[in-house]
Image (cartoon, grey):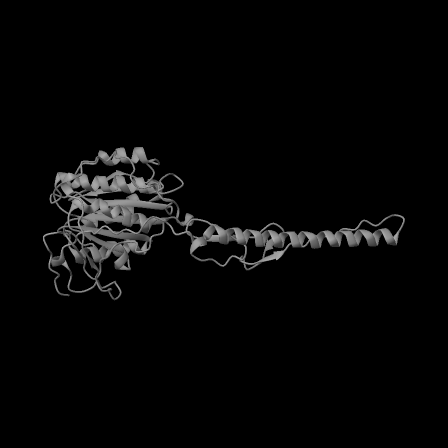
Amino acid sequence: MGQRPVSIQIQRSVPNEVRALGANNSCGSPPYRRPIAARANTAPNSASDHSGTADNHHAGGGDHGAAGGDQRSCDATETDSPCKSRHLDLVFIIDSSRSVRPGEFEKVKIFLADMVDTLGVGSDATRVAVVNYASTVKLEFLLGDHFNKPDMKKAISRIEPLAAGTMTGLAIKTAVTEAFTEQSGARPRSRNIAKVAIIVTDGRPQDQVEEVSAAARASGIEIYAVGVDRADMRSLQLMASVPLDDHVFYVETYGVIEKLTSKFRETLCGLDPCTTGHECEHICVNSNASYHCKCRNGYILNADKKTCALKQVKVEVVEDPCKCEARLAFQKQTQAAVQQLTAKLADVSGRIERLENMVGRA
């Protein structure tokens, strides 16, 4: 792929395998349109071995805020209204090697704090952990340590860079064997809670990442790789889950990394399957990235768990001791009429409900 010239103004120029995360806005917020800068001269010559055919790259221009003017701390108040995210066990794996300057590392911490702000965190919602690495690996806090945003953000603000080398493979392995365990606060596999790792790095790993990343993905961990400045694109591709278009992201400087918050917000916020299409005849109930069907009053769910049938009313006729046939006939007719009226009322209620839904969508 040929190089795209970069003008004085920072422009977006993203390699084939990289594009903005979460192309579809799933939270009802306006589409993300702020350009993220990327270096044109770092594009790889070929796609990753475990990717599909790459899409043509997208390019767009526009100014962004100056990186040096951001003086916010990790305890900044929320600026984006949090959406209802999927329930996740989310582990950030952050590079704090010597190449990451102190001011740049503060930008990473702001990014983490912004991510916490935008997610629905809690013991029964999204749990968050942070793995810090350089030549060594440090578990800053675990999935079971903090269940509210203020405590998480305080813990993030106390993280210090480790300096020295870039042992990314070791960090991924540590996250798998120590951070994503039930002992550390991860939910059991039976709970079907998505396990997600977000790796942020600006360099080339000094150890092997392909095998350990493949093992992590095979264990059910979805991996996003965020490269900054000098990051090695090939390594990002080897670490990330497929499709690479949705799991590899690259920014020019740490000064714009927090702009990725909106993109991850779109990606990590669960789509409501009841609004994107379902097969329920009457009522769709959202249940954490899935759904189940219910029926309106007067109906029961069929064996297919999708369609509904009129509930049969058991008619019990008490025989008159006098064997008065006329009275018994009247009782049967009355109860049959009541049953028919009940069915009609249920059907009318269903039609009214459908009309109200149509009016609400309009």
- Residue extending furthest toward the left: 8
Total numbered badges shown on the rendered structure: 0
Query: With respect to residue 101, does 218 lie above or below?
Result: below
Q: Nearer the viewer, residue 187 or 12?
A: 12
Q: Which residue is depicted at the point 28% across and 56% down?
A: 246
Q: Is residue 138 visible in the rendered structure shown here?
A: no
Q: Which residue is depicted at the point 34% across and 35% down?
A: 148
> At which x and y percent is residue 98?
11, 43
Whether residue 108 sits left or right of residue 361 in the image: it is left
Q: Nearer the viewer, residue 117 or 183?
A: 117
> At which x and y percent is residue 55?
24, 64
Which quarter of the rendering shows the N terminus? bottom left
- Residue extending furthest toward the right: 322
Q: Nearer the viewer, residue 127 or 338?
A: 338
Q: Where is residue 149, by image quadrant?
A: top left
Whether residue 354 sits left or right of residue 180 in the image: it is right
Q: Where is residue 240, by image quadrant?
A: bottom left
Q: Which residue is depicted at the point 22% across and 53% down?
A: 249
Q: Is residue 326 visible in the rendered structure shown here?
A: yes
Query: With respect to residue 173, does 161 lie above or below?
Result: above
> At which x and y percent is residue 188?
39, 46
Whether residue 347 sits left or right of residue 188 in the image: it is right
> At which x and y percent is residue 155?
26, 34
Q: Which residue is depicted at the point 67% across and 51% down?
A: 342
